[in-house]
Amino acid sequence: MATDPPPIKPLETYSVFALLVTGRRFTDDFTEDDAVRRYVKLHPGSDPAAVRAELDAEIKRMEG
């Protein structure tokens, strides 16, 4: 018996790091700058520098 696929979360709920990971799953040339631009577009009024700092901190944390 087939089951329904899980629901797709709206992109607006993704962190900037999740946008980066997701973007890289679909294309080899999706960059950190692309993730920041996408996040800022999804969250008007957000500070691109603060978003980039958040992404850099998460990448550093994941690298251990």
Image (cartoon, rainbow, N blue to C red):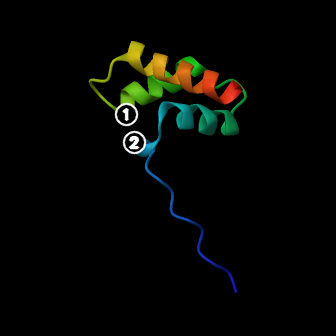
Q: Is residue 52 above or below residue 14?
A: above
Residue drawn at point x = 55 percent, y = 32 percent: 17
Distance of mark 2 from mark 1, alpha carbons? 6 Å
Pointers 2 and 1 in contact (C-beta within 8 Å): yes
Residue type pointed to by label 1: Leu
Residue picked out by circle 2: 12
On-image quarter of the N terminus: bottom right
Q: What percent of the width, then of the height, locates residue 2? A: 68, 81
Residue drawn at point x = 31 percent, y = 23 percent: 46
Name the side, left or right, on which 7 lies relative to 59.
left
Which sits earlier in the primary sequence, circle 2 or circle 1? Answer: 2
On-image quarter of the C terminus: top right
Q: What percent of the width, then of the height, locates residue 22? A: 61, 39
Q: Residue furthest left?
A: 45
Name the side, left or right, on which 28 lies relative to 15.
right
- How many dots with numbers? 2
Q: Secondary structure at mark 2?
A: helix
Name the side, left or right, on which 40 lies relative to 58.
left
Q: Is residue 36 above or below residue 15?
A: above
Residue 42 circle label: 1
Bin the neighbour count of mark 2 within 10 Å (Cα to Cα): few under 14, some 14-19, many 20 and up: few
Residue 3 circle label: none
Residue drawn at point x = 67 percent, y = 33 percent: 24
- Which residue occupies the foreground of this view, 26 or 51? 51
Name the side, left or right, on which 23 lies relative to 46.
right
Residue drawn at point x = 43 percent, y = 21 percent: 51
Residue type pointed to by label 2: Glu
Q: Secondary structure at mark 1?
A: helix
Q: What percent of the width, then of the height, locates residue 38? A: 46, 28
Q: What percent of the width, then of the height, locates residue 60? A: 63, 21
